[in-house]
Image (tube, rainbow, N blue to C red):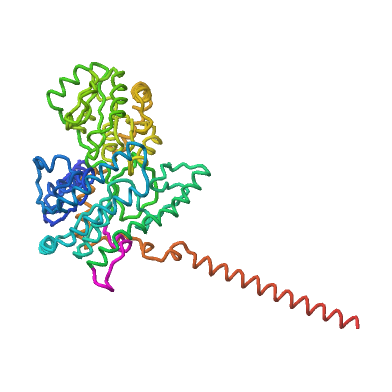
Amino acid sequence: MARREGVFFCFFFLQNPILSETFKILTLALVGGSHYLLMDEISHVLQDNGHDVTMLLRVGNIMIPGFNDNGRSVVNYKIIPWSTGEENERAFKAFFEDQQNEFLDGRQSLSSYLKLMDNLAVQCSVLMNQSAILNSIRSENFDIVVVDGFNPCCFLLVEKLSLPFVVMFPTLIANGQQIGLPCPPSYVPVYQSHLTDRMGFWERVQNVFMYVGEQFVHRQVEGLFHNIIKDHYQEGARPVLYEIYQKAELWFYNTDLSIDFARPLHPNVVYLGGILAKAAQPVPHELEEFIATSGDAGFIVITLGSMLSSVQRPTLLREMNAGLARMPQKVIWRYQGSKWPAELELAPNVRILDWIPQNDLLGHHKARLFVTHCGMNSLLEAIHHGIPVLGIPLFGDQFDNMARVSAKNFGIAVPPEQLTAERFATAMMQLIADPRYKSAAAAQSKIHRSHPFPPDQRLVRWIEHIIISKGGGHLRPYGTQQPWYQQYLLDVALFLCACFAAAVYISVKVTRAALSNLCRQNKLKKN
């Protein structure tokens, strides 16, 4: 009986907040889309757990769907709004629309990524000049800041404000080298390599070259923010981005071992993937009625992410629509009805909606397949509910994400530039008809759901731990502060080589001297 009471006692305190103290926490949402959705959820979770949360939010952001028009209906935390101005927003919108066309044509290049970072640098310059906002943040005396690790501006901002911070990186570990994580290229695929952890010889060769090239990319990105550092920090006290990264008290990553490959981690790295995935709630009545007409065939969910809610490519739409028309399942597709081409008749089994309750639909017992752009948040929701995936990767981390889905055997990919009605329909039928995909998805769901602590508890407990212990210095290995030649023991190797060479040299010299002396003695004897 006493043992049972002890178990209950431990369970109670693991499930309920132990601390009564309220901490003041600032979250930074400088990028929209899935980045904003992630920071919004983090803000809600921390606020719901008794903390005083404020978000620094870039308003007028085209990448925050619905926020500009209607605002968010349920926000339980405070917001500090800021804007880059109409001119900057128009320029960014034009850039983003150009990039969408590039992605749909299957063109993704380093220059596109650097252009995006250049745009973020322009926005950062505007923010750093808003002294009233910065002074307001200083006056709040926040205990800690949660920053989006994708945007270098977040790091420059917390450095300017001299605030302790933890980082939420919105996807896979794409910056392992920057933060000092062990990244053996023999089995840790480099970001954008599209490789798995099981590489053949030539794949390892490719990974090594990308491992080296990754350093040059980081240098180029840091160069884009050089003028901001020059303008906003005094000479002699100008920070280096790499050094600011090392100051993070903790790194959260929006990934999980149900989708990612196992790799070496430091104590200051925590996986937080799936924080947006929830238990499914009943879907709206009109959707339930539509689903009910599907019978045993069930239905398919299609979303291409918050950043590409409507595909403005008639040829691609025509192929997708024709492929869906061949399916016995009903289809619920998130697509803005006002942007659907008037000349294209929608397949009779398809319903398009401006917004869909994606998580709840994936958790519905009649859901059969998820067609997605392969964003990490969407994939983790699919894993949570055990739904097979057909991926149409477009940009960024989505190709690497899909490589992991394929390796885990619960989905297949069809690049947008190769998508035809025939191939689209065949892939969907294969994923639904072959029970191996559903079985693999269910296996990954079990891994994800059976984690000892759900993501929201991990978030709250770790942040409270960092604040109470006055930082995460005890979690950071000293090796991250060592020069690279010490970390890889090159100085020790050089010393041992020198000792060996000296020993060989001395041995040779002694041997020669001994032989020379022996020869001399033999000559004397003969004489």
What count of labels does the image hold?
Answer: 0
Name the residue: 22% across, 54% down.
147
> Is 206 drawn above or below residue 431 in the view shown?
below
Classify the position of the C terminus by image quarter. Answer: bottom right
| Nearer to me, 487 or 56 | 56
Name the residue: 49% across, 46% down.
204
Q: Position of residue 256 (x, y in %)?
A: 31, 43
> Which residue range is magenta in the image?
233-249
Q: Is residue 152 left or right of residue 190?
A: left
Within the magenta stretch, is there residue 236?
A: yes
| Nearer to me, 373 or 250 | 373
| Nearer to me, 431 or 60 | 60
> Is 262 drawn above or below residue 416 in the view shown?
below
Q: Is residue 29 left or right of residue 185?
A: left
Name the residue: 21% across, 63% down.
470
Q: Position of residue 241 (x, y in %)?
A: 30, 61
> Is 351 drawn above or below residue 515 in the view shown?
above
Q: Is residue 436 visible?
A: yes
Q: Is residue 177 left or right of residue 366?
A: right
Within the magenta stretch, is there residue 19?
A: no
Q: In the orientation shown, which residue stands out farthest toward the right? A: 527
